[in-house]
Image (cartoon, rainbow, N blue to C red):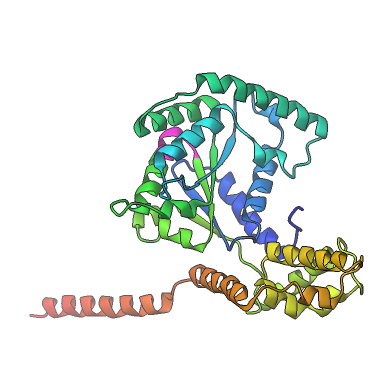
Amino acid sequence: MRMIQHSAYELPRKRLLRALENHRPGHMVFVIGPSGVGKTTMRRSVMQEMFGDPGHWGRGRTPAVETFAMLPNSAYFSSRELARSLLDELHAPTLSWLLEGSNLSEQVKISIGNELAECRRVWIDLKPKRATEGEYWGMVQRSILARGCKYIALDQVTALLVNHRDTSPADHTLHLMALAEASGVMFVMTGVQSAARLWEVHSELRRRVVTVWVPPYSDSRPEDWGPFLRVLQSLGLKYNLSKKDLLMRMAHDILAATGGIFAQIVQLLDRAHQVAYEQGRDRITKRDIEDSYYSDSDLEAIWRDVRSFESVMRAGDVSQRAKLARTRWRMTLQSENDADQP
């Protein structure tokens, strides 16, 4: 199911589009939000808008690739495995960002799929079987330049935080920035709120990072209430409800049961649909939805993530910083005036 377009979703999408259109090699765009708010869907829709017609790419060219920062069996992030994954995408891309949820015709998708299958077949014989981490990254850089790639989307970037004791997550980010600057690409990093640790402790990283926050619906923001109701109204068209306005009547309960996270709302209604089906009914009732709520412990986990995100997204206390600066400058000026006195 595609993300429903609404004002609360469109604002971060516009910010992301503007950040990517302002192409700056060596810089990173972080798309941050709780799991399920639609970060990947939003990022893919922006990439489709920018590069949706493969006929304009040129033979052998790929304007953007997408991969995941997954943890290998060792349970620690591996820079070498990330390089291997990027190399695979550059030579035999999946192009999931282009094909999933796009407006391309089925005939065009089939044609692209056939070409990609041929790329994978050839790449199996050509891909390096053994190489050092440095050699892999060297091949990645050369391949980026050869493919004319301008954007690398990296999902689930919180994996970069899971390191051996002597490895700093910021080291990985700095390395990717150096690669991006040398090869002329921008990284689009997607993750949950803990990904902020990848740049917040390093001033050089902060200067080169653009953050796009993708929040859930919040009862602390009055402007969220209208878009939230419109999403429930749209979702109500998909499900067979016992009352036409059932979701609107239960809006407060649904918000409390889902943390205002879009994917959680859809999953709640899917579970309610299954409950009704198992009882031989084709209409979802209020009781079906209530029987589909998570347990208290699961609900607390959802809301803990939401509170954590809101805390990270919240702007810093500039007033306190400014007060400290005024005090220090006043002391400095007083010292200079005293020194000028005869």
Apparent side of residue 153 relative to residue 168 in the rendered image (left or right) = right
**Which image quadrant: the C terminus?**
bottom left
Apparent side of residue 62 relative to residue 114 in the rendered image (left or right) = left
Residue 148 visible in the shown view = no
Taking the magenta stretch, the answer to whether it contains residue 182 is yes
Q: Position of residue 127 (x, y in %)?
A: 49, 23
Report the predominant secondary structure element of the magenta stretch. helix
Q: Position of residue 173 (x, y in %)?
A: 40, 48
Q: Position of residue 34 (x, y in %)?
A: 58, 63
Q: Residue at x 61, y 21 (%)?
A: 121
Q: Residue at x 81, y 34 (%)?
A: 106
Instruction: Give the quadrant of residue 323.
Output: bottom left
Taking the magenta stretch, the answer to whether it contains residue 253 is no
Residue 212 visible in the shown view = yes
Q: Which residues are magenta?
A: 179-185
Instruction: Give the quadrant of residue 48.
Output: top right
Residue closer to the observer: 12 or 91: 91
Q: Position of residue 204 (x, y in %)?
A: 35, 53
Pick out the residue farthest to the left: 342
Q: In the rendered view, would you say 152 is above or below 307? A: above
